[in-house]
Image (cartoon, grey):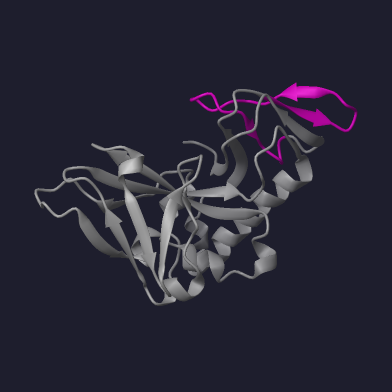
Amino acid sequence: MTVFNRRAFVGSAAALAVLGASTARAETKDVPCTDIFPFLLNYLNLPTAERTHFRLAYKLAVTGARLSDIRLVLKHNGETPLNVAADNTLTPLPPVAALKAKAPVTVTRPDGSKIGLTLLIAAALPPSAAYAAPDLKKAVDQARAGAKKAAGVMSLAVPNLDRIVFVGAAGGQAIGTDGKGVALPKTKDGHPVFQPAAQATAARVTLDKAPTLLRIDAKPK
């Protein structure tokens, strides 16, 4: 099994350049889905019970064009358009059969534009203004264990995933079993953060609004 890239586990540090703004005039290109969705097969090869609370997400970024100008179509047992969700991540993700076959994704973009994809690890929980703390802890625990298992002999190089960043929310509280709330710390860019180990007495987490993405991260350097 191919190991996960170490940088892929430091939040959004692993970026995959899919198509660059080169001097080529071509606007359409076929790219193997395994190149666009690195490590997805590793994730899907984990037992289902070990990935119920976390997922991989692939965030699309475009320069020199609008997101709506970009078209991605997976060609496997027909054609499946890949859409951009509210958090700018691609959906649906290719199934195992397509990944094993390295089925192509036809990428169409305006000439001169540039497309990039960033691999993220996220909690597989629906957007909400409130979460049960045990669900958040399970997401972090599964992501950390899954990363190390997929990395195999390189497991010592995998950063220690220990927190959830609520992207899109501006503030929140960890509510203890006694009903008392403690404000969540924030990232440098203002997203609230929940650390299960540091807030072990929390029963639930409440936010000012539902996040667009529950990103699982390691401690920033």
Give the farthest residue toward the right. Answer: 178
Which residue occupies 55% across, 43% down? 217
Q: Relative to 182, is 153 above or below?
A: below
**Drawn side of residue 196 relative to residue 81, left or right:** right
- Residue 168 against residue 218 in the figure, above or below: above
The residue sitting at 26% across, 38% down in the picture is 65
Which image quarter: residue 202?
A: top right
Q: Position of residue 218 (x, y in %)?
A: 54, 43
Q: Main secondary structure of the magenta part?
A: loop
**Residue 158 in magenta stretch:** no
Residue visible at 35% across and 41% down in the picture: 68
Which one is nearer the viewer's eye here, 162 or 92? 92
Q: Position of residue 130 (x, y in %)?
A: 74, 34
Q: Nearer the viewer, residue 132 or 113?
A: 113
Q: Is residue 1 visible?
A: no
Tell whether position 179 is magenta: yes
- Direction from residue 136 to residue 20 in the image, left or right: left
The quarter of the displayed image where residue 88 is located: top left
* Range of residues picked out in magenta: 172-198
Left or right for 80, reference 109 = right
Q: How many marks?
A: 0
Residue 193 seen: yes
Percent x, y for residue 67? Answer: 35, 41
Image-quadrant location for residue 179: top right
Name the spot of residue 31 as percent of width and height, x first. Answer: 29, 63
Q: In the rendered view, would you say 15 is above or below 213?
A: below
